């Protein structure tokens, strides 16, 4: 019998249902803001409403959100942004002359001298020029063309845009995208959304999460049985694994990409976050050009940077850029068309990016204060990286590689068989079961390793090192005590 509404007319079902919606969306998963974070939000609400818990606050160590974790904004960046947002402040004698000069220059490049106006779809031209000059300085003089720079809504938007451009085909001709495991789940989510094929290559945990070209070859050979591999994604410094790839490794990857005709995507948003002795950031573009014309004139590359990480931590402004190298001009025209559909990246984010690539210079009044704040942030992160590794490695059943760079640690945890069985009973991945128990008992929110990918039979979690040092030490001690208690309970 058909259902009817209050007037007796047939009741219509919803137009949009799980059966009629885009099936690709149902395959998308994003662990960084998944079920465990949703539970953390509910616990916070319960605490506010007076619920009694074994803790007084939820510490969200699940996401690289620096300011949410207590990092103070860099004064110079906020001074200029304040004047851009409210130009009346340009009359205020309390702001340094170089900050005023930056604000005026940005406002003059905006329609109607307002950051509330749309910009060109590719980004404000003078900011793209500044990005190019930044890249040239960073890479020791390797030329950069502002026309090859695309400003974006954080690096994430540019990464998804490039994948959208490259994913095509059906069945065995579908585009395959090589991504590292463990990976930042933006990649697996975007590939699923676009109907591409994820090709997993495993980083070597026993060698500090290094990348091995032999493993790339294995993954590529297996994938060619069911798709057309076209893209190779690298995250350096690594997220969630915190490794910094050596120059030799980057050269090997570039040779592999040329030999196998793969488009390289280099996610380099943590390029200032390098802490370990003997480690150094090498951009893929710099290494590509230093390898000579055989590579620099043929290998196609898109590299990405962001205002959300490094010393800035300005996640909410959604500023970033992408630079393309050796892209087919006809495809580049299609890319320009694709970005124009979204009108433009947020103009405040573009303004912030300009300050990151064009910071105060030694002869300017803001330089000393800017460098003091920048150095303090990066030095604190380096100390917290070392502390994290040292404390975790004292705990039986936790193994933590050195945090060479980025903002995270990805320790391996040994779980007793009874805990694994209990997790299966409850329909959860074992490390999700572990992290959920940690959240309920200690109020600490981490992301299980299963949300990033890991070798079969191994278990991990990702944790940010961003909390203030005293709070981070407390978090590490609480996790250590919980792990020992958990292990004893299920032994």
Image (spheres, helix red, strand yellow):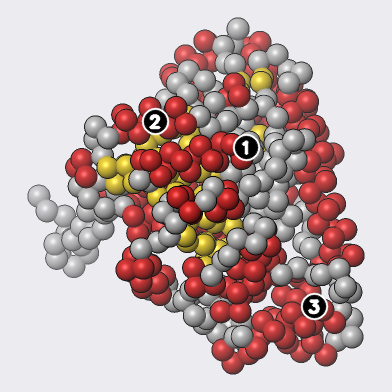
Confirm whether residue 60 shows in the render.
Answer: no
Confirm whether residue 375 shows in the render.
Answer: yes
Q: Residue at x 63, y 27 (%)?
A: 208
Q: Which residue is mark 1?
A: 246
From mark 1 to mark 3, how far is it between C-alphas? 37 Å
Q: Residue at x 85, y 60 (%)?
A: 371
Which sits in the foreground, 365 or 95?
365
Which quarter of the figure has residue 12? bottom left
Q: Is residue 333 above or below residue 117?
A: above
Number of numbered discs on residues: 3
Which sits in the foreground, 51 or 187?
187
Which sits in the foreground, 146 or 319?
146
Q: Which residue is mark 2?
A: 217
From mark 3 to mark 2, how far is it between C-alphas? 50 Å
The picture places residue 217, in percent across and down from the top left corner, at 39, 30
Q: Is residue 343 above or below residue 390?
A: below
Secondary element at image label 1: loop
Q: Residue furthest front?
A: 293
Q: Are marks 3 and 2 in contact (CB under 8 Å)?
A: no
| Lateral position of residue 60 relative to residue 36, left or right | right
């Amino acid at each position: 019998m058909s259902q009817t509404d209050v007037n007796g007319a047939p009741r219509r079902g919803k137009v949009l249902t799980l059966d009629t919606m885009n099936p690709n969306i149902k395959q998308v998963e994003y662990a960084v803001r998944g079920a465990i974070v949703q539970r953390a939000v509910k616990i916070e609400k319960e605490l506010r409403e007076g619920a009694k818990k074994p803790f007084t606050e939820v510490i969200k160590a699940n996401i690289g959100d620096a300011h949410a974790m207590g990092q103070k904004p860099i004064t110079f960046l906020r001074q200029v942004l304040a004047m851009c947002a409210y130009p009346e402040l340009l009359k205020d004698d309390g702001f340094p002359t170089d900050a005023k000069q930056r604000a005026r220059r940005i406002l003059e490049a905006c329609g109607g001298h307002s950051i509330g106006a749309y910009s060109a779809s590719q980004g404000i031209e003078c900011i793209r020029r500044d990005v190019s000059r930044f890249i040239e300085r960073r890479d020791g003089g390797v030329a950069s063309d502002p026309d090859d720079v695309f400003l974006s809504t954080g690096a994430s938007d540019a990464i998804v845009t490039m994948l959208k451009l490259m994913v095509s085909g059906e069945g065995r001709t579908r585009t395959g995208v090589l991504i590292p495991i463990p990976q930042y789940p933006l990649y697996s989510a975007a590939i699923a959304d676009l109907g591409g094929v994820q090709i997993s290559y495993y980083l070597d945990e026993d060698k500090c999460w290094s990348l091995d070209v032999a493993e790339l070859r294995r993954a590529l050979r297996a994938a060619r049985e069911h798709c057309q591999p076209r893209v190779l994604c690298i995250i350096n410094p690594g997220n969630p694994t915190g490794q910094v790839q050596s120059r030799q490794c980057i050269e090997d990857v570039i040779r592999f990409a040329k030999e196998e005709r793969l488009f390289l995507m280099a996610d380099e948003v943590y390029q200032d976050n390098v802490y370990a002795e003997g480690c150094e950031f090498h951009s893929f573009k710099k290494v590509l050009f230093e390898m000579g014309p055989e590579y620099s004139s043929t290998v196609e590359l898109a590299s990405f940077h962001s205002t959300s990480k490094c010393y800035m931590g300005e996640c909410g402004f959604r500023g970033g850029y992408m630079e393309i190298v050796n892209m087919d001009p006809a495809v580049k025209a299609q890319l320009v068309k694709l970005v124009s559909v979204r009108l433009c990246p947020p103009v405040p984010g573009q303004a912030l990016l300009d300050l990151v690539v064009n910071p105060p210079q030694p002869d300017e009044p803001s330089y000393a204060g800017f460098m003091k704040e920048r150095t303090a942030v990066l030095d604190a992160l380096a100390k917290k990286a070392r502390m994290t590794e040292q404390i975790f490695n004292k705990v039986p059943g936790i193994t933590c590689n050195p945090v060479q760079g980025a903002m995270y640690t990805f320790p391996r945890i040994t779980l007793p068989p009874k805990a694994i069985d209990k997790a299966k009973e409850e329909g959860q991945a074992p490390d999700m079961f572990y992290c959920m128990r940690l959240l309920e008992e200690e109020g600490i929110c981490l992301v299980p390793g299963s949300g990033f990918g890991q070798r079969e039979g191994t278990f991990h979690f990702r944790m940010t090192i961003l909390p203030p040092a005293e709070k981070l030490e407390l978090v590490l001690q609480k996790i250590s005590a919980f792990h020992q208690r958990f292990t004893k309970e299920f032994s």
